[in-house]
Every structure is written in C-alpha cells, then in structure tokens.
C-alpha cells in the first residue's frame, strides 16, 4: 500500500534486499554510462563537424536495439552522480574494480566545462571576454520542471564563469532563490531574475541549461546577444544567434 500511494502500480518481489539494492544501482549506472557515451560522442562529432542531434534522430529510426540518450551540460540529482560510487567502493573492497563507472563519471563531470568553453567562444565571436560580461543562466534545476538542484551542473558552470570574471545571474521559474548548498556556498541567496525581453536585453549571453517547458521563447524576439543552448531547446528564429553546446 505504501508504494502504491507513491504512484507505483505494482511491487516487484526479489529474493533479497541485496538484489533490490543492486537493481537500483544497475539502473542508475546504466543511465550514467549511456549519458557519458553520448556526451563523449557529442564532443567527438563536434570536432568532425557532425550534428549529434541529427545522428540521434537517425539512429532512433532503428526499430529495435537502440535506446536514446541525449547529450547535455552534465548530470545532476542525488542518484546518477552519487549512487554508482557506492558500488565502486564496495567493488574495490572485494578486488573487482568498476572502470566503466569511473570513466563515465569523469566524462559527465567534464561537460559543464565544455559548456563554459562554448560560452567563451561565443563571446569571443562578439569581441568580448567572459570577464565583465553579463551572462544569464536559464534553468538551474538539474532536470526540467522541478525545483531540485542537487548536484546540478548549472552550479558548476556558474562557479567557473565567476572564476573567469563573469557577472552571472539566473532565471528559473521553479527556484526563486538559491538555497545553501554543500559545494557552492557563495551562490546562496542569489535571486531569480525575470525572463522578460527588457531584462534579457541587458545580458551579453543567455545560456539555456535546463529545458523547462514553461520558458516563453517569444521573449527572445529581437535579442542581440549570444544564445548558448545546451539542450537543443531554443527554437530557431531569424536574427537569433544560437550556439549549440
């Protein structure tokens, strides 16, 4: 009854709590490794001049044997970035290293810095540097349409931009104010700014990190700065200069 109240339609029984816990870990690791794979391929295809999103669309036409994962600015939440390391710790105890988990974690952790590099390049194209540029991060939560920012890659991007001298603000319809976090103390108390054309016009770059469904992209009409899109969520419009990161 407890699980049904949480929205689960049925309870799957297994032989032990160990098996249940390993099933949870397997599901998390499966996602972590596959997200890392597509993130790495994105970086490779980028160098080759190939659009990863078109590749994914084509691969998805295969009627079997392919499950789509999309690239992004990194991973967040309390499951995928954290739980797999319980298994690596236990595996080392018994002398069975989990190389896939470690490599996937390294790849996913590098993605926010790849986004920062795209921001730097986009600003350079406008004869600007990150230092003293006004940059708006659009979406801080680790996934769309929630207020959860645990382990969010947006915060890593934010800190990296601050170290480069950027003036960084954010908009998130689900997070009006940044709460205290374990790793990003200096961001505590920052408040979300309006997502309105007049406000957006004051920024040199807009960086879309979380693809919230509530974003009103009509507010980008006439925007003259750089748009950096990490989720392929911003509609193409005449005059809008979009960099896909």
Image (cartoon, grey):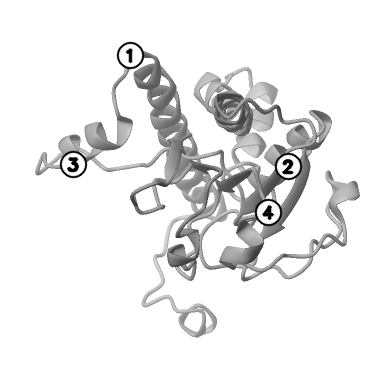
Q: CA distance from mark 2 to mark 4?
A: 18 Å
Q: Secondary structure at mark 1?
A: helix
Q: Secondary structure at mark 2?
A: helix
Q: Is residue 243 above or below residue 168?
A: above
Q: Which residue is mark 1?
A: 48
User: Alpha carbon of mark 2 to alpha carbon of mark 3: how far?
Assistant: 33 Å
Q: Which residue is mark 2?
A: 158
Taking the spot 62% from the left edge, 34% from the top edge, the residue there is 112
Between 82 and 12, the one nearer to me in the picture = 82
Between marks 3 and 4, how big is the CA–CA gap?
Answer: 40 Å
Give the CA separation, mark 2 to mark 1.
Answer: 28 Å
C-alpha span from label 1 to label 3: 21 Å
Q: Is residue 4 above or below residue 19?
A: below
Q: Are marks 2 and 4 in contact (CB under 8 Å)?
A: no
Residue where numbered disc 4 is placed: 202
Q: Quadrant of residue 94?
A: top right
Instruction: Give the residue at mark 3.
Output: 60
User: In the image, which is nearer the foreground, mark 4 or mark 1?
Assistant: 4
Looking at marks 2 and 1 on the same chain, the residue that comes earlier in the sequence is marked by 1
- Kindly state the secondary structure of the residue where label 3 is placed: loop
Whole-percent x and y of residue 85?
65, 35
Q: Secondary structure at mark 4?
A: loop
């Amino acid at each position: 009854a407890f699980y049904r109240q949480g929205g689960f339609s049925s309870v799957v029984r297994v032989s032990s709590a160990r098996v249940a816990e390993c099933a949870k870990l397997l599901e998390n690791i499966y996602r972590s490794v596959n997200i890392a794979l597509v993130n790495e391929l994105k970086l490779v295809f980028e160098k080759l001049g190939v659009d990863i999103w078109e590749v994914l669309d084509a691969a998805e036409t295969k009627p079997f044997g392919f499950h789509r994962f999309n690239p992004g600015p990194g991973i967040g939440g309390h499951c995928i970035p954290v739980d797999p390391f319980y298994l690596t710790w236990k595996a080392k105890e018994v002398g069975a290293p989990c190389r896939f988990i470690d490599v996937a974690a390294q790849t996913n952790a590098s993605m926010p810095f790849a986004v920062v590099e795209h921001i730097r390049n986009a600003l350079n194209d406008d004869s600007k540097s990150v230092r003293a540029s006004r940059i708006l991060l659009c979406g801080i939560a680790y996934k769309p349409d929630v207020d959860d920012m645990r382990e969010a890659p947006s915060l890593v991007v934010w800190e990296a931009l601050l170290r480069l001298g950027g003036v960084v603000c954010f908009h998130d319809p689900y997070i009006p104010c940044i709460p205290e976090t374990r790793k990003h103390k200096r961001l505590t108390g920052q408040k979300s700014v309006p997502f309105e054309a007049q406000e957006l016009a004051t920024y040199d770059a807009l960086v879309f990190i979380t693809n919230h469904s509530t974003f009103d992209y009509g507010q980008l009409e006439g925007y003259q700065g750089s748009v950096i899109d990490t989720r392929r969520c911003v509609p193409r419009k005449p005059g809008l200069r979009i960099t896909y990161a």
